[in-house]
Image: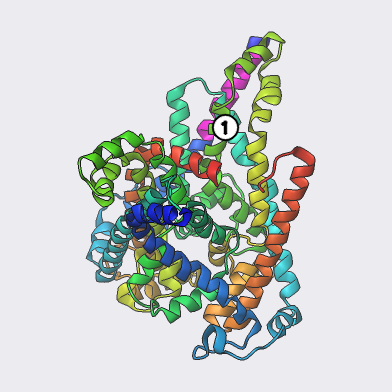
Amino acid sequence: MQTHRFSVFNLLNYILLTLFGFLMIYPFIYILIYSLNDGKDSMMGALYFFPRKFTLDNYAQVFDNKQIWQAYKITILRTVTGTVLHVLLCTLMAYALSKKTLPGRTFFTFYIFLPTIFSAGFIPYFITLQKLHLINTFWVYVIPMLFNFMHIVIIRTFLQGIPEEIEESARIDGLNDFQIFMRIIIPLSGPVIATISLFIGVAHWNDWFTGTYYVSDKNLIPVQTLLQQMLTEAEALSSSMQRAAQQGGQTVNVNMAGATPESLRMALLVITVFPILCVYPFLQKYFVKGVMIGSVKG
Amino acid sequence: MKSSLLWKRVWRHKLFYLFMLPGIAWFFIFSYVPLYGLQVAFRDFTFVGGFTGSPWAGLKYFEQFFDYYQSGAIIRNTIVISLLKLLVGFPMPIILALLLNEIRNLKFKKTIQTLSYLPYFVSWIVVVTLMQRLLSMYGGPVNDLLTSMGMQPVQFMYNTTWFYQLILGSDIWKNIGWNSIIYMAAIAGIDQQLYEAAKIDGAGRFRQIWHVTLPGIRNIAVILFILATGSLMSAGFEQLLLLNGPATANIGSVLDVHVITSGIQQGRLSYAAAVGLFQSGIALVLIVTVNWIARKVSDVSLF
């Protein structure tokens, strides 16, 4: 009797979670299909699981667009620069803070912790950026994201697990602290560096706010900001698809081939999301651990 | 004697201080300078005058905010939206973790987990674009499905009837998987002997969940709940900045967005700083209060 009830529960559970998994992935499948279907054809709707009129034209046009190329370049550049610098500097700081013998260690930990419980908010921060002349430069993407308290804590916790003896023997061999950091600490920190790189890399890749509010130079905006501008346009024009087709042309070059602003937008969306989708499943083991450390210590 | 020993220790660690130097400088500039700059909320800020050179204005900008005919609505909307998120959104990852924990097929479990993290890794821009497309009246699959079942198409986006459902739904969709990680970890840390003991006592699956699993994740849930109340005054500005439009402004204008629109778009920096300070002041009071209640009721607290 009891086992019977359990199996009903099991069955329902499997069905429920399958449905859940479907809900998580379907929007992405849908935009993939939309982007691979002829734009004008897609406007008729009833597109669910397979493209009706398969075409690569949307992608061809997106890749042909100079503005999109430029934005993509900015996104990649800021993500790479921002991630490398962030990981290097946070690891350096975390390495120092992992030394129990360091005088002032508690003070410095508190010094970087305090802003996480009471931050000044948006406006004083914005004024600070202005005063630093970071507004409307490339570095406004990189410098304000160089450090993160939680990331430093996650790295520090990892580094504390590295046996002291390894460093000691290197010190006896005549290496100084910086050489030890570069030749021993960094190579041993693979998992935690992968985790933090993912966290900060995704943050850089997804950041649209900086590009929208702190940058006005058209050549400096990243893909996410471009998507945001298209979003606002699509909003204003949602009443008439015909008008959308004409006006959307201002940002995305439309020709007669059957692509619509909407199908181009979907193609752009796919190439924006795709790199992340390729990376995160492989780092799952690591970031799950990172989240745990982050929440236990934080 | 003692101070020279300390000095020796400091000197031995000289390179480590050098390692920390960029971080110390960065936190000073990007965290402490803005804190000092909070005083612009009490000044008539001019760019030339800066944080300290602008003339004092007293509580003028706070009064301006409370005199603003929409300030009541903005505060109410902020609290309603974040309360909804807390009440509906908070239990969701716990439920997901409980359901996943009952799955014995590891491959299936892992697949669902991986899929559940996916929306967390895309930006709100992408989420809102997806919503626009999927819920569109013009060839969106959701409305196609509705019409094929003989129903009328629905204008979901920028419609007051559906606004809160969409806010809640998209928030849960984006974060449920990620937020369940911590509960999965807590469940994995529960002593298996407790389950064995419960089984011997005749507890079925649901009673095991009730008496072993839930108490096992109680502490972490309380702590996360306290943290969540700290953000009760911020309804999630990225999401609302993108999802709220003129049509839904009555129920969708919130403090975070008001700070940005009045501060950056309209250039009223002192006013916006005052609104922001009001917001974080209340948030601080809230988190301290809930922390105090949690300590009284459940012995678990953040500080």
Residue pointed to by mark 1 = B186
Point 69% across, 52% down: residue: B84
Range drawn in magenta: A4-19
Q: Where residue A271 sits in the image (x, y, percent)?
A: 32, 54
Amino acid carrying label 1: it is Ala
Q: Is residue B104 magenta?
A: no
Quarter of the figure with the N terminus of chain A = top right
Q: Where residue B132 sits in the image (x, y, percent)?
A: 50, 59
Q: Where residue A295 sits in the image (x, y, percent)?
A: 54, 43
Picture colour scheme: rainbow
The local secondary structure at tag 1 comes to helix
Question: Does any portion of residue A131 appear in the rendered image?
Answer: yes
Quadrant of res B220: top right
Quadrant of res B108: top left
* A225 lies left or right of B38: left
**Residue B110 versus residue A292 in the image, above or below:** above
Residue most extreme to the front: B1
Quadrant of res B186: top right
* A77 lies left or right of A229: left
**Residue A97 versus residue A20 in the image, above or below:** below
**Residue B209 versus residue A37 in the image, above or below:** above
